[in-house]
Image (cartoon, grey):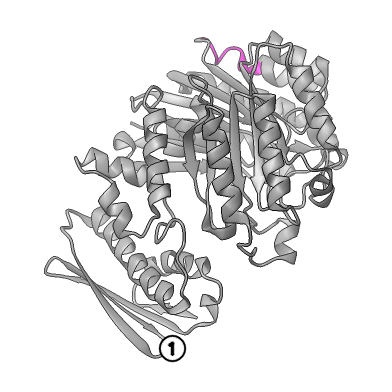
Amino acid sequence: MLTCNAAFLHPELMDVVRLFAGAEALAIDQTSTYSDGVFQNRVTVDGTARTFTHPARVADELSYKSLAKRYAKLALYETLSERLHTELPWGALTGIRPTRLAYQELAAGRDFLPLFEQMHVGAENAALVGRVIAEQKPYYERREGNCDLFVSLPFCPTKCEYCSFITAPIAATRKYLPDYLSALGGELAAAQPLIKNLRSVYVGGGTPFAPEAEELAQVLAAIVPLRTNGCEYTVEAGRPDTFTCEKLDVCKEYGVTRICINAQSFSDATLARIGRKHTAQAVRDAFALAASYPFDVNCDLIAGLTGESFREFCASVDEAIALSPANITVHTLCLKKGARLKEETARLEEGELAEMIAYSRSALTAAGYAPYYLYRQKYMAGAHENVGWTKPGKACVYNIDVMEEICDNLAVGANAVSKKLFAGGARIERHGSPKDIPTYLNKTEKLISERAALFARA
């Protein structure tokens, strides 16, 4: 149980507590104060207290809250790390993308490494952040009017055991598809005047290849008037059991430049355990089918899938490299509310997970891939991270923009979340669509009006 004297700190501190196995059973009280240029945190665990002091200059309310969170989490992390004899790969960093914190330090004219060391980030992870920033340099752009477009197609053949998205088997949701496609068309038409400089288009899911080719074509046709500058265009095709030449032909016809093949694993046993209704050979077949098209290909793997051994995971990394996609993203399994596996496993054991992550970094680097984006989530196994790796010159602009939150994101469809940046990105306002498809269909006109009002604001 955790108590603290500042309500806005409680969720931040709970994020730290959840990092440590056994910490939620401890009686923890934390008192945080700021006076005369010093943050003071008193942390009491089962009656034993420690006091931490951190001098810091506060410029305004925003910087006060940011620093208060940082030092409160650091104090609690150091206390629990010592109490439970555990060090974590990203130390006390929670609730923020590591690269974003690094960029903030660089913008202030400081090297980010001293802060990462203070926050107990491992040296290899700090170096990884430096590599990501270097790889992002040709693509990283903060400019007024920049915008990405996201189109949600929340339909899948089946729902995977680890998935927490709203997707349901298309057999159960197909009845909504005609109205859904019509609503998307209306949203896209209304979005056209709201976009100034389109950086990229991303059609995601779900599994965008789950609908039939002519249904996919209807979506891509509605995007044509918005994509007038030939920018990057990704369709997250998704699961290999949905691939057909007809759908790839549609993508080529409408100018798609990149597709995603979400392998997750090349182990048939693992694929069966997570509820995939296809084999590893289907993944290979999807790559072979896509090879004759002019697409860059992204491929996803997940470390920490139920029952998968270190050897099986390494074999998946090796096979993904052999297939030579433009990008390979290595996710760490994250069990959120809504995933079936969440009901079975409250916390995954670290086990061989750290070795899996280390192997993927080593193998991908040796194969000529460089890390170009990374992010972390709550409930991530082993407190690790997700990293996107790219061949030279093949980074996905959309992934960089979204992960670094450096430009507006106009998102349409069910469960789509638009983001509008203000004051150069110092403030972000969000507009979310309903997750439930029938609810979304009933509110489409209202969503169009609300989004227009948000994007019209200076």
Residue 419, position as x, y percentages in the image: 46, 37
Q: Is residue 417 visible?
A: no
Three-letter code for the amino acid on which mark 1 is drawn: Asp
Residue 294, position as x, y percentages in the image: 66, 11
Q: Secondary structure at mark 1?
A: loop
* Residue at (74% x, 52% y) in the render: 308
| Left or right relative to 458: residue 53 | left
Q: Determine the residue located farthest toward the bottom in the rendered image.
A: 47
Q: Is residue 317 visible?
A: yes
| Left or right relative to 162: residue 85 | left
Residue 251 location, quadrant: top right
| Left or right relative to 209: residue 116 | left
Label 1, on which residue?
46
Q: Residues within 10 Å of mark 1 (few under 14, many from 20)?
A: few
- Range of magenta residues: 222-228
The prevailing secondary structure element of the residues shown in magenta is loop
* Residue at (86% x, 41% y) in the render: 277
- Is residue 149 placed above or below 386 in the rendered structure? above
Task: Reply yes or no: does residue 446 show up in magenta.
Answer: no
Residue 105, position as x, y percentages in the image: 26, 44
Viewer-proximal residue among 6 and 176: 6
* Residue at (41% x, 51% y) in the render: 96
- Is residue 43 placed above or below 221 in the rendered structure? below
The C terminus lies in which quarter of the figure?
top left
Viewer-proximal residue among 318 and 186: 318
